[in-house]
Amino acid sequence: MNNRALGHVKKSQYTLEKAARMLELEYADDAGRLAYIAGFHAALAFISLRSDKTPKTHSGTRSEFANLARHEPVIDRIYTTFLAESYKLKTFADYGIEDEAIVTLSEAQDAINLATRFVELIESLIKSAK
C-alpha cells in the first residue's frame, strides 16, 4: 500500500466535501478553488503511485501527471485538461478582481463533478495496486 498516495486521496475527499458545502452556501469561487485542490491532490496521489517524484509546484504537478497519465489507458485526457482549466478557478478565487475573474455556480458545480470522478478513478487505481 502506498501511504502517500492514500493520504492524497483522503485529502481530495475531504476537500470535495468542503467544496460541496461552499457550493450549498453559494460561494462559487471557494467551491471552484476547492474542486481544483481536490484534483491537485488526486494528481499527486497518482504521481506517488507511479513514481518517486514529488513535484514542488502546481505546474510541475500538472506536467508530471500529464506525463505519467499518457501511459495509463484508464485515465482520460479530460483529467489533464481539468487540472489546467480548474487551476484558473483557483486563480480567480485567490487573486481575481476583474469582472471576468468570477466563478459561477455552474462552473463550480461542473468542476466538483469532474473532480469527484477524478478522485474516484485515482482511488480505484490505488486499491487495485495493493
Image: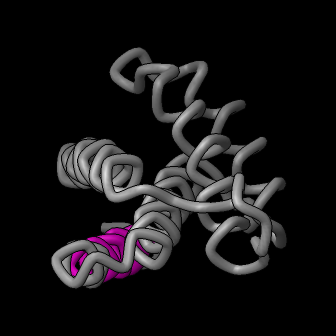
Q: Is residue 118 visible?
A: no
Q: Quadrant of residue 101?
A: bottom right
Q: Residue at x 28, y 53 (%)?
A: 109
Residue at (78% x, 65% y) in the render: 98
Magenta span includes 9? yes
8 with respect to 14 (left or right): right
Q: Is residue 88 covered in magenta?
A: no
State which region is magenta.
5-17
Picture residue at 68% right of the left edge, 53% below the top: 88
Q: Position of residue 10 (x, y in %)?
A: 29, 78
Q: From the top left corner, tell me how far across and down residue 111 is, in percent.
A: 38, 49
Residue 20: name its quadrant: bottom left
Instruction: Report the front residue among 55 and 3.
Output: 55
Image quarter (top left, top right, bottom left or bottom right) of the C terminus:
bottom left
Closer-to-camera residue (17/50): 17
Which of the two residues, 38 or 68, is positioned nearer the viewer here? 38
In this rendering, the answer to whether 31 lies above or below 86 is below
Image coords of residue 17 (percent x, y)? 20, 79
Looking at the rendered image, the quarter that the N terminus falls into is bottom left
Q: Position of residue 93 (x, y in %)?
A: 62, 74
Q: Main secondary structure of the magenta part?
A: helix
In the image, residue 113 above or below residue 97:
above
- Residue at 22 percent across and 84 percent down: it is 25
Q: Is residue 127 visible?
A: yes
In the rendered view, does 60 fall on the left or right side of 99?
A: right
Q: Residue furthest top?
A: 73
